[in-house]
Image (cartoon, grey):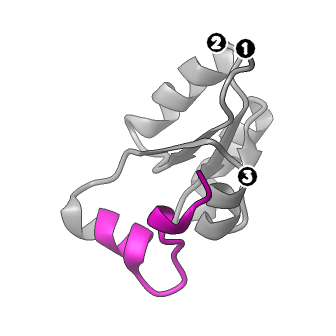
Amino acid sequence: MTQPRLGFVGIGLMGDPMTRRLLDAGFAVTVWNRPPEKSVALRVASATVAGSIGKLVEGVDVVMLCLANTAVVEGVVFGEGAADVRAAPD
């Protein structure tokens, strides 16, 4: 069985260490963050950095969110320029 390709959105105080643990466990992780500079250190740690939320969703099997609140989640998932994860292929 192959490991799922993981997508992680929200590289903050919790998201960064969670992503690092996934990388350390051998998962392929693609990350995206609204201020992209927060993703640079994870790129160095072997994560793939997506240029947009849409590109992240297209390239992974599982999407995880670690965001501040419901309004931010709604903006990232359903806002202008966002990818509606409900439309992702099965």
x then y, percent, for residue 38: 58, 51
* Amino acid tagged 1: Met
Q: Nearer the viewer, residue 70 or 90?
A: 90
Where, by quadrant of the figure, is residue 32 drawn? bottom right
Examine the rendered structure and indicate whether residue 27 appears above or below residue 77: above
Q: Residue at x 21, y 62 (%)?
A: 70
The label shown at residue 63 is: none
To which residue does mark 2 refer?
A: 25
Question: What whole-number distance in Å separates the C-alpha atoms at marks 2 and 3?
Answer: 19 Å
Question: What whole-number distance in Å separates the C-alpha atoms at marks 1 and 3?
Answer: 19 Å
Examine the rendered structure and indicate whether residue 52 appears above or below residue 6: below
x then y, percent, for residue 29: 67, 36
x then y, percent, for residue 54: 63, 68
Q: Nearer the viewer, mark 1 or mark 2?
A: 1
Q: Nearer the viewer, mark 1 or mark 3?
A: 1
The label shown at residue 1 is: 1
Q: Nearer the viewer, residue 54 or 45?
A: 54
The magenta region covers: 73-90
To which residue does mark 3 refer?
A: 59
